[in-house]
Image: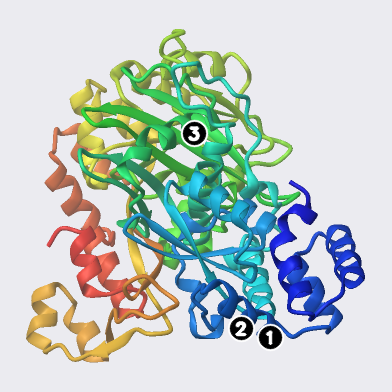
Amino acid sequence: MSNTALNLGLSTLFIRKQLLTEEQITALISTSRKNKTSLVSSIVSSKLLSAREIAELCYEEYGTPLLDLHEFDILNISDELLNKKLISKHKCLPLFKRGNRLYIATSDPTNITALEDFQFSLGLHAEAILVEDDKLTKALEKILEEDISGLGLEGIDEDALAGIEVTDTSRDDEPSTDSSDDAPIVIYINKILTDAIRKGASDLHFEPYEKRYRIRFRIDGILHEVSEPPVNLSGRISARLKVMSKLDIAERRVPQDGRIKMKLSRTKSIDFRVSTLPTIWGEKIVMRILDSSSAQLGIEKLGYEDDQRLLYEEMLAKPQGMILVTGPTGSGKTVSLYTGLNILNTEERNISTAEDPVEINLEGVNQVHINLKAGLTFASALRSFLRQDPDVVMVGEIRDLETAEIAIKAAQTGHLVLSTLHTNSAAETLTRLINMGVPGYNIASSVNLIIAQRLARRLCPACKQAEDIPQTELQRLGFQQSDIDNGFSVFKPVGCDQCSGGYKGRVGIYEVMKMSDEIARTIMEGGNSLQIAKQAKQQGMRDLRQSGLLKVIHGVTSIAEINRVTSF
């Protein structure tokens, strides 16, 4: 529809009230079409009438409710109402909804087409609220600029929010993600993804239930609900995510895995690993954010104490042997391994990794994605590595005896091997290998170092607060008497606008155990994990609890957080 048609109602009003001539109206309509602005904006810009005069005139003529937009907090407008394409097209701003009614700020109450478009897009009955054009213009500028600057992602491409380029693989019986009906879904999903990146989330959970649909972010290891879209949009949301991940949206009976690459700038992009799971109320989708910059962290930023870091670097410098990193899912094992690989990644070394899946791409490292369906297992990949003159080998996880035996053989024949296991402590890692069937003498002769780790939330430096705890309580919690005598401050979380519940970021807590002659002898004699741990502590190893309490002494985290992530 032309601008002339859109502005016909107001044009007639201005002429009838003898406020403007037909010649002036014709010229103003031509200007508005040329500048892609509304007739009201052109009139205000030409200073023929003020924004306030036009608003009062429309109020008297049409009886449309009049609102001072300066008294309305536009930052509280729900994200689900902010269809940026329609806002930009019609120069109108959805303010709020009441029941099934949507109230839209406009300086032209005769613009029926705008109301119809919003009504069709959001499925709500649209009603106009009259506002002054100059105030509306400023509000629209703030809302539309929020796409880039408000997200805190400097240099982000506009395409990152307007839509990620994907091919449409939908079928006739599926909701199409390219239709105008789904434009709000496209914008909504990309807003969720960019919000997750801005807030430092590690995972996103899209969860359908019988009467609600919720979206949660895992931030600093804790899940937080961030949005609750209408449950009837469940199918459209999952279809959009699956199309972006290049998954089969017609298949909803079995789990699927995919990836999304989101470009933030010319030099920075973020990968999302996507996993779908059929549930009784629809498909739950979990996305893990894979930020390659996390693998570029220096080892000094991971939270190792000086003696632990030096021990890790010493073992990385050895030409052969095995370094094992252990801990539960989400404890930072991958970052620890990749940090070690970055130290080793030089022109003189041939490095190969077998991972399931490859989470972060490392330039200069030959990375292999395990494919069990095709017969490419950790063991078969490791065999192939050993035929290709490797210096350093990284195995994503030792899951069975076959993989363990090949890895140990590689460590004994002049290769440095890095890998992970899922155990609770460094000592238990050795007994796990024995339980798999690996002879004790092979473990003693090949393993150089074991690192057990957890991730604890860092206290926000802006709002953390000291608390008084009696000495007897500190002793009960596990603090050494020498530390108590030296004096230190214990801090607790408070919470402010710069953090999440008093915490901001995470730090590693480590148990670093070097294979010594005494520990090797304990293994050979069939010692259990308790005996191995006792021997390691006698040699000066700090367990996870002690390392965590050291972080409390340094003011990095709280006692409550250490109690959460370590046994007490």
Q: Residues within 10 Å of mark 3 (few under 14, many from 20)?
A: many
In the picture, the disc for residue 240 is 3
Q: Residues within 10 Å of mark 2 (few under 14, many from 20)?
A: some
Q: Which residue is located at x 49 percent, y 80 percent?
A: 72
Q: Which residue is located at x 55 percent, y 49 percent?
A: 116
On the image, the x and y values in percent for residue 481 come to: 16, 82
Q: Which residue is located at x 83 percent, y 77 percent?
A: 20
Q: Is residue 299 above or below residue 71?
A: above
Locate residue 88 relative to residue 221 in the image: left or right.
Answer: right
Looking at the rendered structure, the secondary structure element under dot 1 is helix
Q: Nearer the viewer, residue 277 or 370?
A: 277
Q: Is residue 436 above or below residue 428?
A: above
On the image, the x and y values in percent for residue 347 come to: 74, 38
Q: Is residue 397 above or below residue 38?
A: above
In the picture, the disc for residue 56 is 2
Looking at the rendered structure, the secondary structure element under dot 2 is helix
Q: Nearer the viewer, residue 177 or 514?
A: 177
Label 3 and label 1: CA atoms lie apart by 46 Å
Residue that mark 1 sits on: 53
Please report contact status of discs 1 and 2: CB closer than 8 Å, yes or no: yes
